[in-house]
Image (cartoon, rainbow, N blue to C red):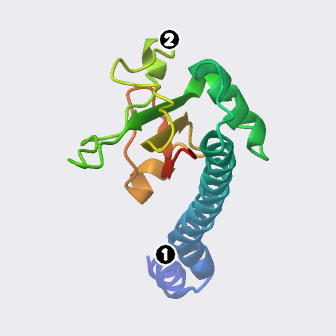
Amino acid sequence: MTTLMSKMRRFIMSADGSTTIEFVIWFPLYMTLFLTSFELTYYGFRSVFLERAVDMQVRELRLGQRPADLDELKEEICEKTLIVFGDCERELTVDIRDISTSTWNVPEGPLPCVDRADDFKEPEDVEFGPGGAGDFLLLRACFVTDPLFSTTPWILGLPRDASGGIALVAVTTYVNEP
């Protein structure tokens, strides 16, 4: 019995494996921090490239180089992004509205984005009004994309749609040249 007690005492007082406990506690926290920073950087790049593409397209719109329809506008914006956005033209929603300078009524609420859960259905309240000379226009673009890591939206508190996607949004205003 004394040998059993002495072996038990040595086992309890032993320091073997103590670093394993620290590793098990801290490693998930460090990996979460690393993966979250990687995901934020990835979305930051994609957001900047979407903003850049929209700004380049708005310059052409402002100068009167208007696309024939909404699909052609989406195609031109997608071509101007420097990184591939997957199926950009299906996942991108572009809304162009004429804003009255007497009332300044702008659309309220969230930006309408494509519904990927319903076979990439376009929102019904999207407008494509290229406007005339001197018109003040609001252009809103929404691109729905999947996160790289499935836990990121919960960690960062990002809103997700029904399909699990996260929206990247670009909003700008411009006046058509007379």
Asked whether, in this view, residue 91 is left or right of residue 121, the answer is: right
User: Badge 1 is on which residue?
Assistant: 4
Is residue 171 visible in the rendered image? The answer is no
Residue 134 placed where, x, y %?
47, 45
Q: Toward which corner of the image does residue 162 lie, by quadrant? A: top left
Residue occupying image coordinates x 50% and y 50%: 174
Asked whether, in this view, residue 121 is left or right of residue 47, the answer is: left
Within 10 Å of the Cα at label 2, are there few (<14), some (14-19), or many (20+) other Cα atoms? few
Residue occupying image coordinates x 51% and y 39%: 133
Q: Toward which corner of the image does residue 135 lie, by quadrant? A: top left
Q: Secondary structure at mark 2?
A: loop
Vertical arrangement, residue 113 with respect to residue 117, above or below? below
Residue 34 placed where, x, y %?
62, 67
Instruction: Inspect the image, locate mark 2, and give the three-letter code of the amino acid beneath it.
Output: Asp
Task: Name the foreground residue: 61 vs 2.
Answer: 61
Looking at the rendered image, the disc whose residue lies closer to the viewer, 1 or 2, is: 2
Residue 130 placed where, x, y %?
51, 30
Instruction: Inspect the image, locate mark 1, and give the three-letter code of the amino acid beneath it.
Output: Leu
Vertical arrangement, residue 95 with respect to residue 159, above or below? above
Residue occupying image coordinates x 64% and y 30%: 66
Within 10 Å of the Cα at label 1, are there few (<14), some (14-19), or many (20+) other Cα atoms? few
Q: Secondary structure at mark 1?
A: helix
User: Badge 2 is on which residue?
Assistant: 119
Image quarter of the N terminus: bottom left
Residue 104 badge? none
User: Mark 1 or mark 2, which has the lower sequence index?
Assistant: 1
Is residue 70 visible in the rendered image? The answer is yes
The extreme left residue here reads 103
Residue occupying image coordinates x 69% and y 34%: 65
Asked whether, in this view, residue 94 is left or right of residue 86, the answer is: left
